[in-house]
């Protein structure tokens, strides 16, 4: 299956909001902020009663939420202001799916990822997200398709190929191979 997607800055900003609670890194970041705010608030408390612990937990929750919103806002400003046009991030992306790999081609790169190496494929209401590493993901917006049926078929194919490659080990270096690749 093949599709051509034209990614915009707003697609990247929408992606970060859609993945807010789906990425472990975000959850760990919020947990770390919550612990920091909890300890800071509790350190200023006059006593360690249940009330002060509860208040510290609530203040920490507000602090973690505010911290995450600030981090997302800074990232959104970076995406809006940085020159991403000639780095293969914005613009045309030709994406193809096969039973063994996810492939993305732009004017500056040609990347292929075996389904077995992809941590996650998530179909969201407005886009398909193929998380190729724990820090990088490709959004495939719904608007790139002519119909809802085409979008659903593409999502189903991607999710099916990803699941199949992870469930069925093959020999001779195919999808599902758990042996590390040789780079020599």
Image: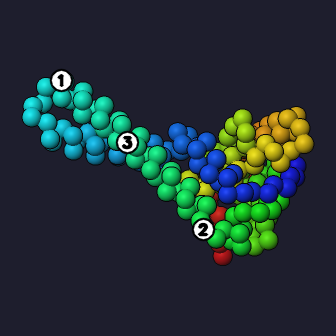
Q: Is tag 2's residue or tag 1's residue first in the polypeptide sequence?
A: 1
| In the image, farthest residue toward the left | 46
Is residue 99 or residue 137 the one in the foreground?
137
Tag on residue 50?
1
Q: Quadrant of residue 40?
A: top left
Camera-near label (2 vs 1) is: 2
Is residue 57 or residue 128 the one in the foreground?
57
Q: Is tag 2's residue or tag 3's residue first in the polypeptide sequence?
A: 3
Please, what secondary structure does the residue beneath circle 2 have? loop
**Labelled pair 1, 3 in contact (Cβ < 8 Å):** no
Q: Which residue is mark 2?
A: 82
Position of 28 with respect to 183 (left or right) is left
Is residue 173 or residue 60 the one in the foreground?
60
Q: Is residue 118 visible?
A: no
Q: Which residue is mark 3?
A: 64
| In the image, farthest residue toward the bottom | 184
**Labelled pair 2, 3 in contact (Cβ < 8 Å):** no
Task: Measure the alpha-carbon separation of dots 2 and 3.
Answer: 27 Å
- How busy is the neighbourhood of tag 1: few (under 14 within 10 Å), some, or many (20 plus)? few
Task: Measure the alpha-carbon separation of dots 1 and 3.
Answer: 21 Å
Q: Is residue 7 visible?
A: yes
Instruction: Name the quadrant of the C terminus.
Output: bottom right
Q: Is tag 1's residue or tag 3's residue first in the polypeptide sequence?
A: 1
Tell me what residue is drawn at x 58 percent, y 44 percent. Answer: 17
Is residue 76 or residue 137 the one in the foreground?
76
Camera-near label (2 vs 3) is: 2
């Amino acid at each position: 299956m093949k599709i051509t997607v034209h990614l915009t800055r707003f697609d990247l900003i929408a992606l970060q909001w859609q993945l807010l609670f789906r990425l472990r890194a975000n959850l760990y970041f919020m947990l770390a902020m919550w612990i920091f705010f909890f300890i800071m608030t509790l350190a200023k408390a006059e006593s360690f009663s249940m009330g002060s612990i509860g208040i510290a937990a609530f203040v920490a929750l507000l602090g973690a939420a505010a911290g995450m919103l600030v981090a997302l806002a800074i990232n959104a400003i970076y995406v809006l202001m940085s020159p991403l046009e000639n780095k293969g991030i914005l613009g045309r992306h030709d994406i193809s799916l096969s039973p063994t790999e996810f492939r993305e081609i732009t004017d500056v790169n040609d990347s292929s990822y075996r389904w077995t190496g992809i941590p996650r494929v998530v179909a969201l209401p407005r886009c398909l997200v193929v998380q190729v590493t724990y820090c990088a993901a490709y959004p495939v917006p719904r608007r790139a398709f002519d119909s809802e049926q085409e979008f659903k078929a593409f999502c189903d194919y991607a999710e099916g190929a990803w699941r199949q490659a992870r469930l069925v080990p093959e020999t001779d270096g195919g999808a599902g191979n758990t042996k590390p690749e040789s780079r020599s």
